[in-house]
Amino acid sequence: MLIDIPKNIQNATTQPISERVNLRGYHPIQHADDVALNEVVGLIKQAKCPMIYCGGGIISGEASAELLEFVERTGIPVASTLMGIGCFPETP
């Protein structure tokens, strides 16, 4: 799925409606439990051609080492966005 937001909308400014924003369905977790991790591993194993597309979140989350370890263990190919350049070594 691709969501394209026009440039004029991206650059527009507005005033916040309230101080607190509650995004329905967004509940980040800090640590996944064993059941959730096993489910993710199962989904990755079922994928016909998995690929990791990483971006600036890896850099801002200081997760480059974890990404590298994950890729070394799984062998999944990696591509990065412009904001993610440098979060993963480009040479083997």
Image (spheres, rainbow, N blue to C red):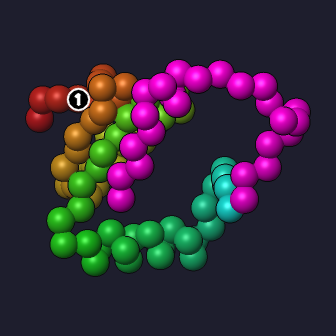
Q: Residue at x 24, y 62 (%)?
A: 50
- Residue 84 relative to residue 75: left or right: right
Which residue is most to the left?
92
| Vertical placement of residue 15 versus 41, above or below | above
Along the viewing direction, whichever of 79 and 18 lies nearer the viewer: 18
**Is residue 32 rendered magenta in the image?**
no
Quadrant hosting residue 34? bottom right
Q: Quadrant of residue 21?
A: top right
Residue beneath disc 1: 89
The total number of labels drawn is: 1
- Considering the numbered disc 1 on the image, is that residue within a helix, a strand or a loop? loop
- Looking at the picture, tell me which residue is in the foreground, 70 or 46: 46
Residue 74 visible? The answer is: yes
Tell me if residue 66 comes above or below residue 16 in the rendering: below
Horizontal side of residue 7 vs 27, given as left or right: left
At label 1, which amino acid type do we have?
Answer: Pro
Q: Which residues are magenta?
A: 1-24
Q: Nearer the viewer, residue 57 or 35?
A: 57
- In magenta stretch: residue 14: yes
Q: Image height check: is 70 above or below 10?
A: below
Q: Looking at the image, which residue is at 29% across and 50% down?
A: 52
Prevailing SS of the magenta stretch: loop
Dot 1, how many residues are within 10 Å of its Cα: few (below 14), some (14-19), or many (20+)?
few
Residue 59 seen: no
Where residue 24 appears, x then y in whole percent?
72, 59
Residue 75: % across, % down: 20, 55
Which residue is drawn at the image coordinates 67% and 56% (left, top)? Answer: 26
Position of residue 43 in the picture relative to residue 75 (left or right)? right
